[in-house]
Each structure stands twice: as C-alpha cells, then as structure tokens.
Image (cartoon, rainbow, N blue to C red):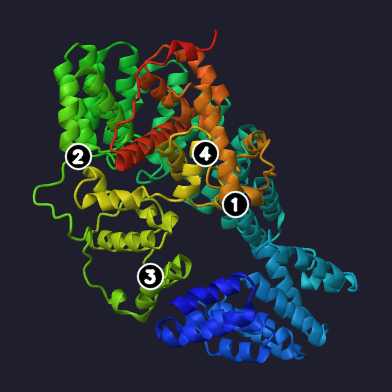
C-alpha cells in the first residue's frame, strides 16, 4: 500500500520512471488491484517513453475492468505513435464496436477518422466522414467537435456538390438534429438547443412523433431562457403536435408549461384553460394535481375566491394519490389565516394532516402541526399551542418547521422547551454506543471480486475508482426522486450510501437520503440513527467552507447548508439558469463578488471549488451584513436577490417572520428558503447541538422606507 501511495505521488509530480517502478512493486503486493495498478503503471511507462513496456502492460489489463476502456485508449495512443495507420484504425474501430457508449467516445472516433485519412483518405471517405459527423452530433460542445468540424470543412472543399450531399457534410437528418439539440439542452445551452430543435422542425424527414418532441423542447429551451412571451405560443404548438402524435405525456407537460407561461404574462383565463387541458388528458398523470393547484392560483389572481376554494377543496378527492393534496389544504388554511379566520384555518390544517399523515415534501414537513400551534397561540391557548409544536418537533425532526416550533416553544414555554430538548437529545434505552451503527445483510454482490476491489480502494482513500467498482455492481441510487418503500432496496441503498460516504464521495453518498430512503427523518439523530443523519448531512468540503465562512463572518452551518441545497456538493453542477459550481453562482453575481479577488469568473473557474467558494461566500457574507445577521432573510436573498427581498419587506415587512416566508409568491424561492433554513438548523443541531435563534419579528431597522 505504501508503494502504491508513493507511486501515485511520483506520477502526480511527473516522476514517471520512479512511478513505473513503484507501481510494479505495488502490483505484486496488491494482486486484488492488479488491473487498476497495472493501468497506472502502463500510463507511467508511456510518459517515461518506454512504449514497448507500456504496450505490453496495457494489453495485459482485463477488458472488463474499470480501467479496461482507459487501457484500450492508451493502447490506441501507443499505436498512433507507430507507422501503421491501418492497425491504428482497426484498434479504434474495435473499441467503438465493443464499447459503443464507452468513455472518450469522441476522441476514439476522431482518432479512427484520423487514422483512416492517413491510411487512404479516398478509400475510407465514407467511414471517416461518418466518424467526424458523429462527433459533431453526439458531442457538439467538445473540442473534438471543433476539430471534426474543421476536418469536414477541409474534406468538403475538394468535393463536388453531389458528393457533399451524398456524404451529408452540410446537412443533418431530423434524428441527428434532435440528438444534437438534446445534448445542448441537457448542457443548459438554451439558445443553441432552441436553434437545434428549430432545425429539426425544418428537416424534411421529420416524423410526427419527432415533431412533438422538437416542438416541446424548443418551447422548453425558450422557457428556460426566461422568455415566457415566446414560450407560451410555442407550448401551444407543442400541445397540438403531441396530440397529433398520440404522446399524452408530452401533451400534458406542454399544456402545463403553457399554463405557467401565460400565468407569468398575466393572461389568467388562458392559463386556466391550459391547466384544465393538462388535467383532462390522463387522470392518472403525475402533473394533474399540480395543474389543479396552479389553476387555483389563477383564480386567486382574478379575485374569484369561490373558484379558488372549489378547486383546492376538490383536489384530494379528484386526485387522491397526488402529492399536492396536502398543499391544497394548506393553502385554504393559509387564506383563512390571512383573512383572520383562525378557526377555519385550523380546520383546513387538521384536514391537511388527515389527507397526508406523513408529508415527505421537504417544504411541508411539520407545516400543519406548526401552524396549528400558531392558531392556538392566536387564541391565547399557549398550552395547546405548545402541544402542537411538540408534535411538530417529534414527528418531523430537524426540518424548517421543527426549527420554528422549537423557537416558539423557547419563547412561550421555556420549561417545555428544555424538557423537549432533553427528550430529543437522549439516546434510546439500551443503546450500545460501541455497537456498529449499521449491520448489512449478506448479498451476492458483496462476495464478488469487484466488491473486494472497492473495499481495498476505500481503505486507500481512492474514492473515484472505488465508486466506479461499486457502480458496476449496481450499488447506485435509482433514477428520479421517488421514495423507496421496498425494505430490501432501502437496505441496499443504505449500504451504498455508507460506502460512498466512507469514500468521501459526498455528492453520491447523501443523494439517496434526499429522495429515496427517508425513514431516518422520522427520528432524531440519537443512537444508531445519528450515523444516518451524518451521511445525509456530511461535512463535505468542510475545511474549505469553514475557512471562507470565518473570513466572511458567516455561520458555517449556513455556508454548508447553502452548498448542500444549491449544488448537492457537486462542484461541476450547472443549473438551467446557468448557475455554476458549489455555491451556484450566476454570472452577474459572480462578477460582482469576484472583484478584488483576482478571480476571473469564467465557467471553468466557477467549477473550481476554491474559486467558487471564494466568490460565493463573499456574497453570503454580504447578505448577512446587509440584514444585520437576521438569518431568516438570508436564504430568500441568496435565491431571489436582496433587491427582491427589499421589495417584499416594503409590502410585508411588518408581518411575522414565519408569515413573511410563507407569503413569498414565487414557490421556488419560498420552498428554497425553507429547504436552506431546514439544513441550517440540521447542521447547527447535528454538529453544535444547539437550536439557532430564529425570531418571529423582523427588526424595524431592517425595513426599507416606503
């Protein structure tokens, strides 16, 4: 193991000769990792210019190992250094055949085409042009696409029009346009993806089904670029196109997005019509209850209270499996509360609990219980209020509303607060602190060589290859964001989360705990359950974040809460709004707070954790200073901007703070604020064992002039 660590250090410093020798010794001593170490050795030999030895070592690596593809590409590099382009082409052709979705596919395609040109450009013209074209379609943002485009232009200039047309040097099929546009769409390149979908719509071979997809995604590209005015009629076009194609899913999604677009444009009647269309196509679609909820919002904007109540009250019966049924009851209660009808509000909130006894929606965990406490507080029944706040804390540990409930208890019934804190801090009876927090049942995967390799890599602190081995075994989170209720799968996911956490792969380890395995959230982090909370809320990038939090006078719990909720600890993340990196900086904010740092806020720099946090933490520190450390105003300002919060304060600054947050009109900003404040509380409690102060009155000195 020591030989391996030293060899890795030698490789990192470019001491390739020493690295190659060290890897050779390590491979002999760690046969379980022979392929992985063998690849590192082959790479070191390559850079040490020992090409024959490098080729021999690379060819000895098992093709199905996690470095099998890397070894094959290294062999390709070694062959390219020789004088046999036919053999080089054959190698890359075999790689692409055996691994059609393999790593560095664009590089392999380019090297194949390059070798074919060197061998006999005329004889291989069809194959090499096809390879270059495939790069520009499947990987349009890569440097390989830039090179491939240049080669196609060079090849094409010597061809007549008929040959250029036959090879499709200047054209793409509808399928190719769609493929390329979808890559751009997924990369958040909204103008480019819109242009791609528009090109697909103009393709003569476009099918009816493809017209639906292209029309919908063109509208989505414009919607993501925040141009609702043009997006609205384009979504209407998508409704028609998808109805003609028989694609009910995209028809519903198009109608729903059209409703959102028209709502933004204050065309409420048209928005209502689109939301109703979305509800009528398929009564079992997951968007149905969301559409009805948004329909109610439009009736509210039109001032038609009876229609609002009719829509919301009908939702649990109309869509009994919809995840918005509790939200509908909440909104009816909230409206009654703002109308000073406390009794009616409490009735709706009790029904909110009835229709969804346990609400896993992060923005609503404990909402009804907390506000029932506020209702009893309004009626001057502080004992009953305390009972509901205690229920909130016991049922929904460490959420946003639990933090509020504990603060209200501390303010009104301090003895009950102290007793509750003692209760939720106590380990279960009979808890053995020396016993392992986890005990996983045997599985076939755990007896495989791949699992043994993963464990050895974890012991060495080599998280990336360990993650690759576990991924091959299927120890990954399922797609989507749905709760997992199968106990066997849940146990397997906890095993996966545990291993990734130990590997320091926090973006992967905590992910299942956000969406899939949620039962740990029903108990406070005491006894064995604490280990689960620590996986869900890890100290990721802790040294970096702690340093910048101190520099900018920011609570570390808020700094890491922002990173967890903004980027899920993924430093490369880029949102649909082109917010980038750990702290999700948009360009205008990054430019503003990069001043004086010497950092150019480019996309690449914002993907660097140190540079990103340098800028993002300065923004967070600015917000804490602006609001005089009044925590509740910081997350909405981080999300919507301090200017928006200042505007809201002019309108509602005299409201109680909990009411102020609930009244944020934009649901994304409102729910984001709750999510971050909940994580802030979680990190504060988990690692400091304290309840942060969250006063329920906004200081008058923070209110702007009217």
Q: Position of residue 391 (x, y in %)?
A: 18, 31
Please tell me in which quadrant of the rendered image residue 657 appears: top left
Q: Secondary structure at mark 4?
A: helix
Which residue has dot 4 on it? 257
Asked whether residue 84 is in view, the answer is yes
Q: CA distance from mark 4 to mark 1?
A: 34 Å
Which residue has dot 2 on it? 425
Furthest toward the left, the residue is 430
Q: Secondary structure at mark 2?
A: helix
Q: Which mark is residue 73?
A: none
Asked whether residue 315 is in view, the answer is no
Q: CA distance from mark 4 to mark 3?
A: 49 Å
Q: Position of residue 200 (x, y in %)?
A: 68, 55
Describe residue 332's horizontal placement relative to residue 271 as left or right. left
Q: Earlier in the sequence, mark 4 or mark 3?
A: 4
In this view, 400 is above or below 27: above
Q: CA distance from mark 2 to mark 3?
A: 33 Å
Describe residue 371's horizontal placement relative to residue 683 as left or right. left
Q: Earlier in the sequence, mark 4 or mark 1?
A: 4
Q: Position of residue 128 (x, y in %)?
A: 75, 78
Q: Which mark is residue 608?
A: 1
Q: Earlier in the sequence, mark 2 or mark 4?
A: 4
How crowded pointer 2 is (Cα within 10 Å; few <14, some 14-19, many 20+) is rated as: some
Q: Secondary structure at mark 3?
A: helix
Please tell me in which quadrant of the rendered image residue 354 appears: top left
Q: Nearer the viewer, mark 4 or mark 3?
A: 3
How crowded pointer 3 is (Cα within 10 Å; few <14, some 14-19, many 20+) is rated as: some
Which residue has dot 3 on it? 459
Q: Position of residue 69 (x, y in %)?
A: 55, 78
Tell me the quarter of the image containing the N terminus.
bottom left
Tell me the quarter of the image containing the C terminus.
top right
Q: Residue at x 16, y 35 (%)?
A: 422
């Amino acid at each position: 193991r020591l030989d391996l660590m030293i060899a890795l250090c030698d490789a990192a410093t470019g001491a390739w000769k020493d690295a190659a020798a060290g890897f050779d010794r390590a491979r002999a001593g760690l046969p379980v990792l022979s392929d992985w170490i063998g690849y590192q050795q082959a790479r070191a030999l390559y850079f040490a210019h020992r090409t024959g030895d490098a080729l021999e070592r690379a060819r000895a690596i098992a093709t199905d190992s996690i470095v099998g593809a890397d070894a094959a590409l290294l062999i390709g590099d070694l062959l390219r250094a020789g004088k046999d382009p036919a053999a080089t082409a054959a190698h890359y052709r075999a790689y692409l055949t055996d691994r059609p979705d393999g790593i560095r596919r664009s590089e392999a395609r380019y090297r194949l085409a390059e070798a074919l040109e060197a061998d006999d450009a005329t004889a291989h013209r069809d194959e090499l042009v096809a390879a270059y074209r495939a790069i520009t379609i499947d990987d349009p943002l890569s440097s390989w696409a830039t090179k491939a485009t240049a080669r196609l232009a060079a090849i094409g200039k010597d061809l007549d029009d008929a040959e250029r047309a036959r090879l499709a040097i200047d054209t793409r099929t509808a399928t190719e346009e769609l493929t390329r546009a979808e890559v751009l769409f997924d990369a958040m390149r909204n103008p480019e993806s819109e242009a791609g979908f528009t090109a697909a719509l103009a393709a003569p071979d476009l099918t009816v089904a493809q017209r639906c997809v292209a029309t919908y995604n063109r509208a989505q590209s414009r919607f993501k670029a925040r141009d609702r005015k043009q997006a609205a009629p384009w979504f209407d076009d998508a409704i028609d196109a998808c109805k003609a194609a028989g694609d009910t899913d995209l028809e519903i999604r198009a109608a729903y997005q059209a409703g959102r677009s028209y709502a933004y444009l204050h065309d409420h009647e048209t928005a209502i019509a689109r939301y109703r269309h979305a509800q009528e196509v398929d009564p079992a679609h997951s968007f149905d209850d969301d559409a009805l909820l948004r329909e109610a919002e439009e009736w509210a904007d039109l001032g038609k209270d009876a229609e609002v109540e009719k829509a919301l009250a009908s939702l649990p019966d109309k869509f009994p499996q919809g995840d918005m049924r509790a939200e509908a009851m909440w909104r009816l209660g909230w409206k009654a509360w703002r109308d000073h009808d406390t009794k009616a509000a409490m009735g709706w909130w009790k029904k909110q609990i009835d229709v969804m006894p346990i609400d896993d929606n992060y923005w609503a965990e404990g909402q009804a219980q907390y506000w029932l406490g506020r209702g009893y507080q309004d009626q001057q029944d502080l004992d009953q209020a305390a009972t509901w706040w205690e229920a909130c804390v016991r049922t929904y540990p460490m959420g946003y509303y639990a933090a509020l409930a504990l603060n209200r208890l501390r303010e009104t019934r301090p003895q009950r607060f102290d007793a509750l804190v003692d209760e939720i801090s106590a380990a279960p009876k009979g808890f053995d602190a020396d016993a392992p927090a986890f005990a996983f049942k045997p599985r076939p995967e755990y007896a495989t060589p791949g699992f043994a390799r993963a464990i050895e890599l974890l012991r060495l602190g080599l998280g990336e290859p360990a993650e690759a081995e576990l991924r091959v075994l299927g120890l990954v989170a399922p797609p989507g964001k749905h709760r997992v209720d199968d106990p066997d799968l849940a146990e397997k996911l906890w095993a996966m989360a545990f291993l990734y956490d130990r590997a320091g792969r926090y973006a992967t380890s905590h992910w299942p705990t956000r969406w899939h395995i949620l039962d740990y959230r029903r108990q406070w982090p005491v006894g064995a359950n604490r280990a689960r909370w620590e996986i869900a809320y890890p100290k990721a990038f802790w040294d970096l974040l702690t340093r910048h939090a101190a520099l900018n006078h920011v609570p570390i719990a808020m700094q890491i809460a922002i990173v967890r909720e903004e980027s899920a600890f993924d430093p490369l993340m880029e949102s649909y709004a082109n917010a980038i990196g750990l702290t999700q900086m948009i360009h205008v904010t990054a430019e503003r707070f990069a001043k004086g740092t010497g950092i150019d806020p480019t996309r690449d720099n914002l993907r660097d954790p140190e540079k990103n946090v340098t800028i993002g933490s300065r923004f967070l520190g600015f917000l804490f200073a602006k609001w005089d450390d009044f925590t509740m105003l910081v997350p909405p300002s981080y999300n919507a901007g301090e200017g928006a919060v200042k505007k809201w304060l002019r309108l509602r600054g005299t409201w109680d703070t909990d009411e102020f947050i609930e009244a944020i009109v934009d649901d994304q900003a409102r729910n984001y604020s709750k999510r971050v404040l909940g994580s802030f509380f979680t990190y504060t409690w988990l690692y400091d064992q304290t309840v942060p102060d969250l006063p329920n009155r906004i200081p008058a000195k923070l209110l702007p002039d009217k």
